[in-house]
Image: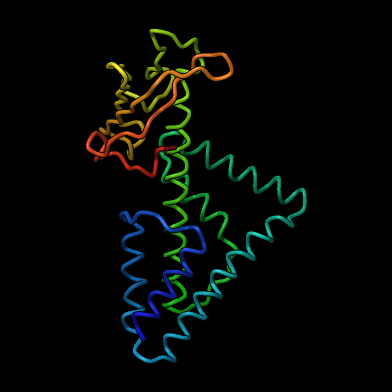
Amino acid sequence: MKHSFKLAVLLALMSTTLLAQAESRLDVATKRFEQLFNDAQTEQEQVALINEMNQIVFNIQQAALQRLRLSEKEQEKFVQELEEINKLYGDSQIRQSCLAMIKLQMRNVDVPNTPSAIALFEFLEAQAEEGCVDYAIQRKIVTMLRYPNDYPVGKTLTLPSQKDFAFLKSATRKDNQIIWQFNDFIPELSGLTLITNFQIEQIYGENKVTYLPTENKHNKHFPKKWLPY
């Protein structure tokens, strides 16, 4: 029974589209959350946890709907708060910015004052934070990879530098590969290297750089979740 219960929980969580790779804060929240399941001994306790989990997810959805119904003045205030967060953390402190935005968006979520409800909420909050970080980094990587196509593509490629992307240490071409090295501007990218295979194709009469799947051995330390292909 406990195995089927855990499976039901995982499937329900996946439906929230918030699942992400476990890292520091998420890892702590995950272990705490899993301990609740391990402590549930009876079917009644398990059903109670499932119901509580569903209620928290529902409350998060309701809070999101409420934001859509804000008055114009309230919406302006909410947007202003988001802008203040962006201004405070800038482009480098992505994780701090994401956490602050998630907390802002979830501040009106009704969470029962029980250990299990609090643990579940913190778990979902941590997952949302991780998803936000991954999306923000992937968006920056996508913009970086598109850079050569902003210029004429021929025998030579125009590659970006740190002045174009503050998080980029260098970009160099070696045959049909571009080697991207990252500095410590964004802590999550610090010291990482991305090697991309590419080819030049004619698209609508213009030469364009298109990227090919890269073997894992070249990018074993670079998270695949940040790549657009």
- The location of residue 158, given as percent across then percent down, is 42, 12
Q: How many marks?
A: 0
Q: Nearer the viewer, residue 68 or 143?
A: 143
Above or below, 93 against 128 in this view is above
Quarter-of-image position of residue 1 = bottom left
Q: Furthest-left residue in view?
A: 217
The image quarter containing residue 177 is top left
Quadrant where the image shows the C terminus: top left
Q: Residue at x 68, y 47 (%)?
A: 77
Q: Position of residue 86 (x, y in %)?
A: 52, 38
Residues 64 and 10: in front is 10
Q: Residue at x 63, y 59 (%)?
A: 64
Quarter assignment of residue 31: bottom left
x and y, in percent, of residue 78 in the image: 65, 48
- Left or right: where 22 falls relative to 127: left
Position of residue 185 in the picture relative to residue 69 (left or right): left
Q: Residue at position x 31%, y 80% from top? A: 38
163 left or right, relative to 103: left
Q: Position of residue 145 (x, y in %)?
A: 43, 26
The residue lying at 71 percent from left, 55 percent from top is 68
